[in-house]
């Protein structure tokens, strides 16, 4: 683990230019892992239009700050020149955020070579601190906790560009390995507890809210519904039974897609998770994109998708779906909580 990185971002040496203060007003979108490339093997290609549309017509027009949290460009496979040529419209949106003073960009393991680009138009940071007036949020990509990426990233880059790209294998990251995901998340979790703060990472491509991934969240939700069931009656009782059955079905699918011994592990190691770790997921999901929204009172995990093509658990009616005008895209808030409440839980449970 590159422990010096975690030490630096809470020390006096932290770059003050990478502090975003929204304690009085302001809204921030945190999104990561675009893996923008060029040609047919571009990972962002399936979601490129929805990313551009929601950034420009929803977040830019409504005054949001934008934090691009690493691995935006796929420099492990493509040159920056080719990427910029492929994604002119998206860079135009970035330019608009930057011109308004509302763009922050952190480095990931797939785009850290941007620091060597003399004419790159945007400031680059290892981390961004968001001052909410309630609890600080540190936004960083997350690969800094992985020895593989901090010590062997050049070798990984060469393998991606010259061995895997020619045969059409998509990007390889810790998102492919449950063990590596767990290690990255655990390091960020421990850092957040130690410093009474919230971390928002990317890198693993796995959305997290209050330190819970989808698997853990479903288990807690089933437990909550089972507690409510005895006191319910009529249609409410039928609704709870139906929700539990659907959640059990989804839990079974997750068990089959992961290694069972990894799923039995926990980020928090005891009965109560400390809600200090969040992950924006990625923009290259098969059926939509995840992102984190923050203002000076709340934090939310949101999901954008094409109408009629979202994940099944969205369409079952558990979540409110908001159509975005006539664009054909929809937004849904998967989880939301008050920062004041999270601060209290972190202070009480993180001791």
Image (cartoon, grey):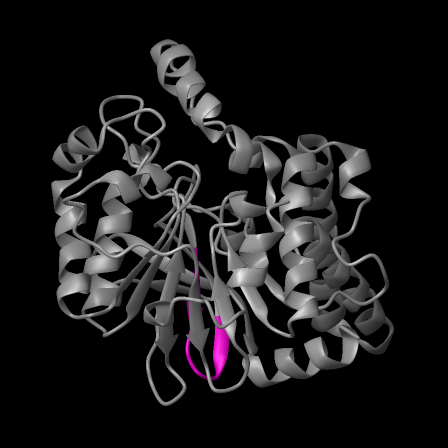
Residue 343 image-quadrant placement: bottom right
Q: Is residue 160 left or right of residue 185?
A: left
Q: How far from the left and from the top, in percent, is residue 165?
A: 37, 16
Q: Of 334 and 94, which appears nearest the observer?
A: 94
Residue 104 image-quadrant placement: bottom left
Q: Which residue appears farthest toward the front when viewing the image?
A: 13
Quadrant showing the N terminus: top right
Secondary structure predominantly adopted by residues drawn in magenta: strand
Q: Of 248 and 236, which appears nearest the observer?
A: 248
Judge whether residue 292 is colored magenta. Answer: yes
Quadrant showing the C terminus: bottom right
- The magenta-colored residue range is 291-299
Q: How far from the left and from the top, in percent, is residue 96?
A: 14, 61
Residue at left 71%, top 31%? 256
Residue at left 73%, top 39%? 252
Q: How far from the left and from the top, in percent, is residue 10?
A: 54, 69
* Res 97 visible: yes
Q: How far from the left and from the top, in percent, is residue 282?
A: 44, 46
> Taking 146 as reference, is 294 above or below it?
below
Residue at left 18%, top 46%? 120
Query: How many numbered marks appear?
Result: 0
Q: Is residue 157 left or right of residue 222?
A: left
Residue 30 image-quadrant placement: bottom left
Residue at left 71%, top 43%? 249
> Taking 162 as reference, is 92 above or below it?
below
Q: Of 255 and 83, which appears nearest the observer?
A: 83
* Res 317 visible: no
> Taking 299 as reference, is 247 above or below it?
above
> Taking 15 as reference, is 283 above or below it?
above
Judge whether residue 187 is colored magenta. Answer: no
């Amino acid at each position: 683990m590159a422990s010096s990185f975690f030490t630096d971002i809470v020390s006096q040496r932290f770059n003050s230019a990478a502090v975003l203060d929204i304690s009085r007003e302001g809204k921030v979108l945190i999104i990561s892992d675009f893996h923008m490339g060029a040609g047919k093997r571009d990972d962002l290609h399936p979601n490129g239009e929805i990313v551009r549309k929601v950034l420009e017509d929803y977040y830019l027009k409504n005054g949001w700050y934008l934090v691009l949290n690493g691995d935006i460009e796929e420099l492990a496979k493509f040159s920056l020149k080719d990427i910029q040529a492929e994604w002119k419209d998206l860079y135009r949106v970035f330019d608009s955020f930057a011109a308004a003073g509302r763009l922050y960009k952190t480095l990931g393991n797939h785009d850290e070579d941007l620091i060597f680009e003399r004419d790159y138009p945007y400031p680059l940071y290892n981390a961004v601190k968001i001052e909410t007036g309630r609890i600080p949020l540190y936004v960083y990509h997350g690969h800094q906790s992985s020895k593989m990426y901090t010590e062997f990233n050049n070798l990984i880059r060469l393998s991606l560009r010259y061995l895997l790209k020619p045969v059409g294998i998509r990007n390889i990251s810790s998102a492919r390995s449950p063990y590596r995901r767990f290690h990255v998340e655990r390091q960020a979790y421990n850092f957040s507890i130690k410093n009474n703060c919230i971390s928002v990472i990317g890198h693993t491509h796995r959305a997290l809210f209050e330190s819970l991934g989808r698997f853990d969240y479903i288990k807690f939700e089933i437990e909550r519904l089972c507690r409510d069931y005895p006191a319910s009656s009529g249609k409410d009782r039928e609704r709870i039974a139906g929700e539990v059955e659907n959640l059990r079905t989804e839990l079974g699918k997750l068990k089959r897609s992961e290694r069972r011994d990894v799923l039995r592990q926990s980020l928090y190691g005891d009965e109560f998770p400390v809600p200090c770790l969040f992950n924006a997921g990625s923009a290259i999901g098969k059926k939509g994109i995840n992102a984190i929204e923050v203002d000076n009172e709340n934090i939310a995990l949101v999901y954008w998708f094409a109408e009629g093509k979202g994940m099944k658990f969205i369409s079952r009616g558990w979540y409110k779906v908001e159509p975005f005008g006539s664009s054909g895209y929809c937004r849904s808030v998967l989880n939301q909580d008050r920062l004041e409440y999270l601060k209290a839980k972190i202070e009480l449970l993180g001791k």
